[in-house]
Image (cartoon, grey):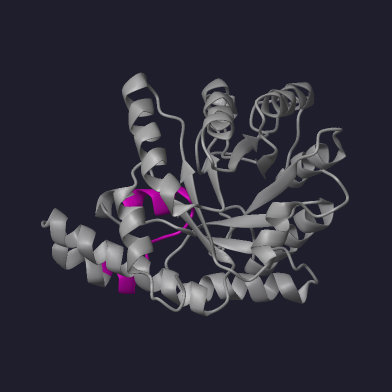
Amino acid sequence: MSSQESSLGRELKAGAPSFSFEFFPPKDDAGEETLWRTIAELEPLDPTFVSVTYGAGGSTRERTVRITGRIADSTTLRPIGHLTVVDQSRAELENVLKQYAAAGVTHLLALRGDPSGGPGQPWAPHPEGFNHAIDLVELVTASKIDFCVGVAAFPESHPESPTLDHDAQILARKAQAGAEFAVTQFFFRASDYFNLVDRTRALGADIPIVPGIMPVTNLSQITRMAELSGSAVPPEILARLEPYADNAVALRKEGIQIATELSDALLAGGAPGLHFYTLNRSLATREIYENLSPVTA
């Protein structure tokens, strides 16, 4: 990364709300057709960036790099490629950086990633690799390739973190190492996000922290995803959703409303934007975007 702040870093600090979307590499050709249709449907919203996730241990590396590169080459979108340290040596990570650069991708999200055995399993670094996301940030920023680097943040605490203050300290260290922005894990209480921002700012880090939004369209799915991330769906949210457990249409409508209310509260409170976890579908994201209060949209 160059010593000068990237255009994305400046944009996220500029004040106008940022809107961005996250996709995952599909497992087959049919899934990839769905993904490209979703990208086409979201492109007119002119997002600040879009990101493509990276499977555990590099399991989707080739597809991730290829899709991210195609977005850079054939759309108007600014793509961010994910990169994790799971089951990869330093040399392998350096090779992926070269692949991204060759594909025209200049923005990365540097992550530790889940243990290779899955969330909740013991973490074991590659013997020739890294132990923490900050190690990857330092590798990228020290490389001769000019990347803008982002990192993850955790409003409800990383599952392996002892305290919320520790989470803020780690995020501040990532910023000091060269990260220009952060994107949070999804959450449901605006207060959790703003508390993380306050803790990070108290440490002297002014890195933009973009809140992640996960629309609730399936109760069992979102509950399971929350558990895997080390958190839980708050009781007040469950109380709004559970009456519609047997009515998929009504539950989806209430889930969209909950996400809209959260999004409005975040933007009204000064969040730099919203990052939508799309699950490779555009409709819920577009509905929330269209529902946002006029003063914040």
List x then y, in percent, for residue 210: 58, 61
List x then y, in percent, for residue 161: 63, 57
List x then y, in percent, for residue 295: 45, 79
Q: Is residue 95 left or right of residue 243?
A: right
> What's drawn in magenta, residue-wise?
222-238
Q: Is residue 286 left or right of residue 105?
A: left
Check the image and report above or below for 92 versus 221.
above
Check the image and report above or below for 297 versus 65.
below
The quadrant where residue 43 appears: top left
Picture residue at 20% right of the left edge, 64% below the top: 242
**Which image quarter holds the N terminus?**
top right
Q: Nearer the viewer, residue 126 or 264?
A: 264
Label tally = 0
List x then y, in percent, for residue 71: 53, 33
Picture residue at 74% right of the left edge, 24% below the top: 98
Q: Nearer the viewer, residue 230 or 177?
A: 177
Q: Is residue 103 left or right of residue 187?
A: right
Say whether residue 236 is magenta. Answer: yes
The quadrant where residue 170 appears: bottom right
Picture residue at 52% right of the left edge, 30% below the top: 74
- Chief secondary structure of the magenta span? helix
Q: Is residue 58 left or right of residue 43?
A: right
Check the image and report above or below for 111 versus 57.
below
Say whether residue 155 is magenta. Answer: no
**Which image quarter holds the C terminus?**
bottom left
Residue 167 visible in the displayed image: no
